[in-house]
Amino acid sequence: MHDAKSNLSKLIEEVLAGESVTIARAGLPLVDLTPHAPRKPQPGFMSHLIVSNMTEEEEQAFFAPEPWDPWAGEDATKW
């Protein structure tokens, strides 16, 4: 264990190079050093927080774009 503390930087470099490193105490293996694998982003990882009671048809009708008339309610004769 003391040797591992003294040579931790060297052991980390070995692990990053692909070697397997096991730290032992009194000849019994205690810890295996492994490189950290970066996590991939999960699309929709918070989707369980959204609850919808609408059917797919209702959602399409609700979110459908509405035609917009910028002159609605205006008197066009004054322009």
Image: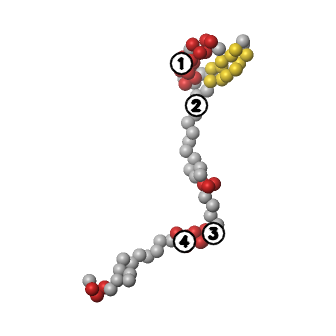
> Which label's residue is closer to the chain start, 1 or 3?
1
Quadrant holding the N terminus:
top right
> Which label's residue is closer to the chain start, 1 or 2?
1
Label 4 sits on residue: 62
Instruction: Name the secondary structure under disc 4.
Output: helix
Q: Kindly report the distance in space between the C-alpha atoms of the residues bearing marks 1 and 4.
A: 59 Å
Q: Residue at x 27, y 86 (%)?
A: 78
Few, some or many residues within 10 Å of mark 1 (<14, 14–19, 20+): few
Q: Residue at x 53, y 18 (%)?
A: 9
Q: Kindly report the distance in space between the C-alpha atoms of the residues bearing marks 3 and 2.
A: 43 Å
Q: Amino acid at mark 2?
A: His
Q: Nearer the viewer, mark 2 or mark 4?
A: 4
Label 1 sits on residue: 9
> Which label's residue is closer to the chain start, 2 or 4?
2
Q: Position of residue 34 (x, y in %)?
A: 61, 26
Instruction: Name the secondary structure under disc 2.
Output: loop
Query: To which quarter of the image does residue 59 belong?
Result: bottom right
Q: Kindly report the distance in space between the C-alpha atoms of the residues bearing marks 3 and 4.
A: 10 Å
Few, some or many residues within 10 Å of mark 4 (<14, 14–19, 20+): few
Q: Which mark is residue 77?
A: none
Query: To which quarter of the image does residue 14 belong?
Result: top right
Q: Position of residue 32 (x, y in %)?
A: 66, 23
Q: Amino acid at mark 4?
A: Phe
Q: Residue at x 62, y 68 (%)?
A: 54
